[in-house]
Amino acid sequence: MSQDPRHEHHDPRPLRPAPGGPPAARHADGPPDQEERAVDADGSTGRAQGSVGLDEQAGRGHGPVGPGEHAGHDKHAGHDKHAGHDKHAGHDKHAGHDKHAGHDKHAGHDPEMFRRKFWLSLALTVPIVLTSEMVMDWFGYRLEFPGVAWVGPVLGTVVFLYGGWPFLLGAVREVRDRAPGMMLLIAMAITVAYVASAATALGVFDLDFWWELAALVTIMLLGHWQEMKAIGQAQGALSALAALLPDDAERVTADGGAERVSVADLRVDDLVLVRPGARVPADGRITEGGAELDESMVTGESRPVSRDVGDRVVAGTVATDAAIRVRVEAVGEDTALAGIQRLVSQAQQSSGRAQVLADRFAAWLFYVATVVALATLVTWAVLGDPGDAVVRTVTVLVIACPHALGLAIPLVIALSTAVAAKGGILVKDRLALERMRTVDAVLFDKTGTLTRGEHVVSGVSATGGGDEDEVLALAAAVEADSEHPLARAIVAAGAERGGARRATGFRSLTGRGVRAEVDGVTYAVGGPALLRELRAQVPDDLAGRQADWSQRGAAVLHLLRLDGDAASVLGALALEDQVRPEARAAIAELRQQGVGKIVMITGDARPVAEAVAADLGFRPGVDEVFAEVLPADKDDAVADLQRRGLRVAMVGDGVNDAPALARADVGIAIGAGTDVAIESAGVVLASSDPRGVTGVIRLSRASYRKMIQNLAWAAGYNVVALPLAAGVLAWAGVTLSPAVGAILMSASTIVVALNAQLLRGVRLRPVDE
């Protein structure tokens, strides 16, 4: 394929060319700022090639979600023992559990362990309850057999030591770490209950307490089992991501055959065969074939995306309808998938302001519970009822267990992060997600965010009322062998209209255009420089329409027929950066979510920016446009909005968007963004669909609402239950036994867990998906 000299100053890196870039400015008839705008209007020169969220960094470990500079090459990325596909991925002991919440002190505990202990403890608790003197008196039956009096002490001791061991071990660790919390409270409760029960068996007290102890331990085990199960499900996002990679791959050998090898054995530059229905084993570029790829597991978009030779593909995606051959460019922990796992893991370990509040409350609750328990013991002992003193002290310790409080925030964090990742939203900063619910202005970078960042043919006009389809077909034929981005847009438009023609004798005219022969006639396509060189005049019937196109920022090319030294203009074509169809819907949804001001920022000339804003439905006097903004001044625009008292979310993707993303209250990097932009953002959208911003708002509000609800429930439960457990209403006949306290405590934990699970119903993806 010939090299179009209009491409002579094009950046040699594989980046998507900017709309109206320097070559286009020389080649097209546009506004005076066309050339400057092409270079630095909105950072599009820093945008990686690709579409629908797949960027050039995919093959280098950055992928469509752009995990950032650290995703593939940073010394910690992918190679960190907790990242990528390491055996600990998704199972790090802190994942989803802030250390202050008490959950990391379960040390080695898993749902299966709690399940086993629960069922065995339950089996031992049943005979303890059935042989209890108190229970037999309640239900009016008697069980008499040799050794019946020792059923409670023997089996109760087994339950205490076997079922209660995780709590006793956790208490020792909390004391050692000087971080008293949930485990210490539980251990205190069951230890007091066991000592009182043993004293009863020895005749010191007249209490039938073994069944209460066994029921308490069993119910606590049930609560922990369900808690760990819920947390495990939330962290399952990491396991699900790791499961996206196939176990093996078909590597193409030197003789053209295929050998099946483990994915771990793949190396960069290997050529792999991906059959229909198979998953891509590593990040790379298609070298042969084309297929519709299901990228939903990475970008969150459910529709298959067409990928052809030269396009990037990401590990874990599925070739749905055809076989492709892929040249591997990143493997294992350097893939985009590993970067996603790292982000999800970091987000699940992070905590926000609500978590700090919960941690502080849980710490104070320990001391409050200890003081109340001691006061209860002393008060009831002084009143002459040591049996009730012990019972109520144990009940206070059980009721006060900050189980629900410790679970309230970490589970919401883990679930919201998992739900977000499934919906194509990667949360890097929990505080950014929390702030998103308060945003009242959203600032969009225009190119690549509200527009596609790629030219399309937006208008065709023929001289003297001629056939516009014929003009487009001839122009497409002449441009067919050119590599210029405007040429590709014309060829694509011609193919869509089905008017394919074949040209011969292609020649590039340096800095002016191209020429070729079609059916024996010589034609040329170019901009103002070509018109001047050929001394061709634009007919009056084209001049008016051309002026309209130029005013709104379109690049205008002309089709000329060459006859010797004479040249006549046959028609003109307008090429513009296409507004994303989903951008209008995104703006409408943001307004429905209560965002008061929509702002667009661009380096384009004011008329160009205003035209795009009008097309997007901006409201005069309410929404705002920052035009002709230099790249270095974008963060000043954010600061200007903030000085007006607005809380700003910035959505961008270019290198020069990074300062603005960092300055904004919430920085959101769009899917095809550059690494620098992604590193500066708190939230990353895996796809390039701007409607994902409304998903972030919905998730922010829903997760914050669940945090507050869970905190209110956990705190309110203790405020009401502690006095009852201490016996302040005993005079009215209202008392709580330790077993009932354990049931209430476990019930509060289950309520918190079920409430957090409702986050799974939050809609993050656009309605049409």
Image (spheres, grey):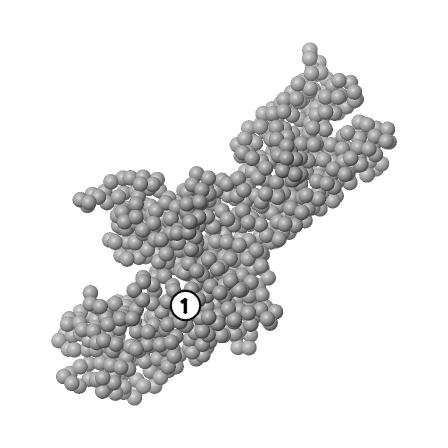
Figure quadrant of the N terminus: bottom left
State whether residue 317 appears in this view.
no
Vertical comparison of 617 with 53: above or below? below
Rendering coords of residue 578 (x, y %):
38, 70
Q: Can you say which quadrant of the picture contains the C terminus?
A: bottom left
Look at mark 1 in the image and give the residue it sits on.
43
Describe residue 62's horizontal placement relative to residue 634 as left or right. Answer: left
Residue 129, position in %: x, y? Answer: 68, 23
Q: Residue at x 63, y 28 (%)?
A: 164
Q: Position of residue 361 (x, y in %)?
A: 68, 46
Mark 1: which secondary structure? loop
Q: Is residue 631 visible?
A: yes
**Residue 489 position in % (x across, y down):** 30, 69
* Residue situated furthest top in the rendering: 146
- Circle 1: is it few (<14), some (14-19), or many (20+) Cα within 10 Å? many
Rendered image quadrant of residue 187: top right
Q: Residue at x 50, y 41 (%)?
A: 92
Q: Quadrant of residue 227?
A: top right
Residue for point 34% across, 61% down: 49
Looking at the image, residue 213 sits to the left or right of residue 270; the answer is right
